[in-house]
């Protein structure tokens, strides 16, 4: 019988900053526009977290039944390790998507019915990352979808449900969040590059090769700080987020040093912390501007 701890680890808690960060940043921007709303912000957070957890379980299920997790070097997977049956993990994914759907429908009733379409697209993207006959994560498109859904959609969506509008600044903050979320995936795929080659998973890292993937990681992290600088042109307190560059130094150094496999695990954790730290500093800076 699968333990509570195993289900917790299967939800991959270290990836949850990718769901929390855009909500914090989007809410900070809403506060700057004097449109902060605690209720809708909380609902947006529930949607984001539920979709992240559901996507993680769906990924565990899909990769597990395909056997592509058998040679991975990352954290435990429920199906591949035998800790839970594929059917049970699939049910967990569906239940998590259902929680996201219920919270999303509540937001749609309060704000706009168009949010149902956004939610449906987000849920589909979560399932089809490694699910379905042609999972886009196996074809080097994972980073694109992460940038769009965990960056632009999550941030702008959080801002929209509070401010009832989307502007260029919300898109910029969304791009910033998206870039660091992409960095997490790039580090993950760099870690798994050898196993993915064996399993014919043509991730972007596999397509680019290890050295160019290391350059990509450095570039997307650096671009996130460029976004902070541009944001500071209007919201000067947002420039305080530049201090988070200190949290980026060790992960970048590790990636650039040629680390492989398990030696890249601290990079994933470090990049997640960087994303959350930058979101908190940006959110606070925006709210104070």
Image (tube, rainbow, N blue to C red):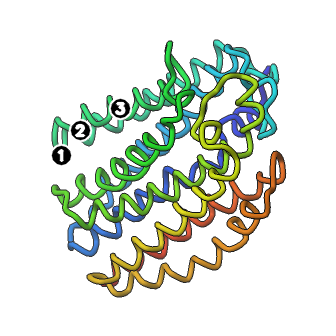
What's the CA distance linking mark 1 and mark 3?
A: 14 Å
What's the CA distance linking mark 3 and mark 2?
A: 12 Å
Kindly identify which residue carries mark 2.
115
Is 32 located above or below residue 40 in the figure?
Answer: below
Q: Are discs 1 and 2 less than 8 Å apart at CB?
A: yes
Secondary structure of residue under mark 2 = helix
Is 14 located above or below residue 232 in the figure?
Answer: above
Query: Which residue occupies the foreground of this view, 27 or 150?
Result: 150
Expressed as whole percent of the image width and height from the top left, the position of residue 128 reads: 47, 24
- Categorize mark 1 by other alpha carbons within 10 Å: few (<14), some (14-19), many (20+): some
Residue lying at 33% horizontally and 47% vertically, measured from the top left? 153
- Categorize mark 3 by other alpha carbons within 10 Å: few (<14), some (14-19), many (20+): some
Q: Is residue 61 left or right of residue 197?
A: left
Q: Nearer the viewer, mark 1 or mark 2?
A: 2
The numbered dot on residue 102 is 3
Q: Is residue 212 left or right of residue 229?
A: right
The numbered dot on residue 111 is 1
Expressed as whole percent of the image width and height from the top left, the position of residue 50 reads: 48, 38
């Amino acid at each position: 019988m699968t333990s509570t701890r195993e289900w917790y680890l299967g939800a991959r808690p270290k990836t949850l900053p990718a769901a929390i960060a855009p909500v914090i940043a989007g809410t900070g921007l809403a506060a700057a526009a004097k449109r902060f709303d605690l209720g809708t912000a909380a609902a947006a957070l529930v949607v984001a977290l539920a979709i992240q957890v559901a996507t993680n379980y769906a990924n565990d299920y899909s990769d597990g039944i395909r056997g592509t997790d058998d040679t991975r070097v990352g954290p435990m997977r429920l199906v591949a390790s035998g800790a839970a049956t594929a059917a049970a993990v699939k049910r967990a994914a569906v239940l998590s998507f259902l929680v996201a759907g219920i919270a999303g429908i509540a937001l749609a009733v309060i704000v706009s019915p168009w949010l149902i379409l956004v939610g449906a697209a987000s849920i589909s993207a979560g399932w089809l990352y490694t699910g379905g006959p042609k999972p886009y994560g196996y074809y080097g498109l994972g980073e694109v979808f992460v940038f769009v859904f965990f960056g632009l959609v999550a941030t702008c969506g959080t801002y929209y449900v509070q401010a009832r509008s989307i502007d260029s600044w919300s898109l910029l903050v969304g791009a910033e969040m998206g870039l660091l979320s992409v960095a997490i995936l790039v580090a993950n795929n760099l870690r798994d590059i050898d196993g993915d080659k064996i399993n014919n998973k043509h991730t972007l890292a596999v397509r680019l090769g290890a050295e160019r993937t290391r350059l990509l990681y450095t570039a997307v992290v650096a671009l996130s700080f460029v976004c902070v600088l541009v944001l500071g042109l209007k919201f000067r307190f947002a420039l305080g987020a530049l201090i988070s560059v200190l949290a980026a130094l060790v992960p970048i150094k590790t990636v650039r040093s040629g680390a492989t496999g398990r030696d890249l695990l601290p990079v994933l954790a470090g990049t997640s912390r960087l994303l959350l730290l930058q979101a908190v500093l940006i959110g606070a800076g925006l709210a104070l501007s």
